[in-house]
């Protein structure tokens, strides 16, 4: 059996090597001619899977190692009887840690008081609900909205948009009763206050980037943090220069999350083939480069927490890389955006780091556990 796959999917050969011959290609360059005799297609979000790609192929199964499926024409696949799967929630923890890293940095740069702010969460799926759970454990107030869920704890979109900090965690949709395409447009932006903060780590077109660019012209003190952009990799350079933090679509790019996405698609393909799944991510994940940190019992709680978060993941590193690329000519800049993602550093999640507490400080112990660190006391 022949498997055509995006070359940037981690541990591809280790998971799928037993199931067939693997042809690895750059995700944006997978074409119909590569699939004429392929049985399975394994992709990421950069590959558009539709009639044009699959019409003359022998593909029976499509797997995307991502949480979203807006890059897949599921109607066409259903019509053709082609099985497909995604990896819902695989990078939820990674995205939550991106938001937590942003919050940590804002406490330093904006004197953000996490004890008094309210975080607004738009979208209460795998990522939004996990963020809410993490915030609740940390004692940070939040409000969340999701029109598709019948949950008395949820509030209206309008109420969430009045929160001090707003974090978007929705799929991209252009149809239905609650489309998210350009959900944040000129009208919504003009309802926001200059001191509010907006984070988008979901999908680029959820925010009308041109409207946000114009809004920041008139409200330069407004704080926008973007990990995702319209028309990637051809992002709006003016906007990228104006945002407080801008990163190249890497919020969900922890190595742990990417490997889990590979594993989820592998298991789905094994099920499709009626075979037992013999591999799991635990077999392949090595100890992270930063594996241990120690704090004494008299260490300041806030200092300790923010030191640990930033040691594991400081988004300003990725921001600086993107900013440096903005000086390049168009084609080189677009290539750099993809290159950042292709060659992204091996960022590990908090759970891979052992926190050693010398003499137990109950508050510090609780905070580290709430963040997901592996605490030893």
Image (cartoon, rainbow, N blue to C red):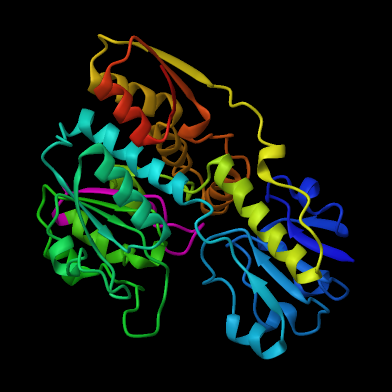
Q: Is residue 221 visible?
A: no
352 w.r.t. 96: above or below: above
Seen at 21% across and 32% down, the residue is: 107
Seen at 53% across and 41% down, the residue is: 254
Seen at 90% across and 66% down, the residue is: 1
Q: Is residue 243 magenta?
A: no
Q: Which residues are magenta?
A: 218-237
Q: Is residue 310 left or right of residue 86?
A: left
Seen at 66% across and 90% down, the residue is: 79
Q: Position of residue 330 (x, y in %)?
A: 51, 53
Q: Position of residue 256 (x, y in %)?
A: 57, 41
Quarter of the image where the C terminus is located: top left
Q: Is residue 67 visible?
A: yes
Q: Position of residue 74 (x, y in %)?
A: 59, 80
Q: Is residue 313 left or right of residue 153?
A: right
Main SS of the magenta part reads loop
104 w.r.t. 172: above or below: above
Q: Position of residue 44 (x, y in %)?
A: 62, 60
The residue nearer to you, when weighing 18 against 136, is 136
């Amino acid at each position: 059996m022949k498997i055509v796959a995006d070359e940037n999917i981690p541990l591809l050969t280790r998971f799928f090597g037993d199931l067939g011959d693997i042809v690895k290609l750059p995700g944006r360059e997978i074409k119909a001619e590569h699939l004429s005799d392929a049985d399975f297609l394994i992709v990421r979000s950069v590959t558009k899977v539709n009639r044009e790609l699959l019409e003359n192929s022998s593909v029976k199964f499509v797997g995307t190692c991502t949480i979203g499926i807006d890059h897949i024409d599921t109607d066409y696949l259903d019509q053709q009887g082609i099985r497909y799967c995604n990896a819902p929630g695989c990078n939820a923890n990674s995205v939550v840690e991106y938001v937590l890293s942003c919050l940590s940095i804002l406490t330093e740069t904006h004197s953000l008081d996490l004890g008094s702010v309210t975080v607004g969460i738009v979208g209460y799926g795998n990522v939004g609900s996990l963020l809410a759970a993490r915030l609740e454990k940390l004692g940070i107030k939040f409000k969340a909205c999701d029109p598709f869920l019948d949950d008395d704890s949820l509030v209206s979109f309008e109420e969430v948009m009045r929160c001090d900090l707003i974090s978007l965690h929705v799929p991209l949709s252009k149809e239905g009763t609650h489309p998210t395409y350009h959900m944040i447009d000129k009208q919504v932006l003009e309802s926001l206050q200059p001191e509010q903060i907006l984070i988008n780590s979901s999908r680029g077109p959820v925010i009308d980037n041109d409207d946000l660019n114009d809004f920041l012209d008139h409200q330069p003190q407004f704080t926008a943090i973007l990990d995702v952009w319209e028309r990637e990799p051809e992002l709006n350079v003016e906007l990228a220069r104006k945002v407080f933090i801008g990163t190249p679509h890497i919020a969900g790019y922890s190595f742990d999350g990417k490997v889990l996405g590979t594993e989820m698609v592998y298991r789905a393909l094994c099920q499709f083939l009626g075979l037992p799944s013999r591999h799991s991510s635990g077999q392949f994940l090595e100890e992270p480069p930063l594996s241990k940190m120690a704090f004494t019992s008299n260490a300041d709680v806030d200092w300790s927490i923010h030191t640990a978060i930033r040691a594991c993941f400081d988004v300003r590193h990725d921001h600086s890389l993107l900013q440096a690329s903005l000086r390049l000519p168009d084609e080189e800049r677009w290539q750099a955006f993809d290159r950042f993602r292709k060659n992204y550093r091996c960022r590990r999640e908090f759970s891979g780091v052992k926190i050693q507490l010398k003499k137990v400080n109950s508050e510090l112990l609780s905070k580290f556990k709430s963040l997901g660190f592996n605490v030893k006391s």
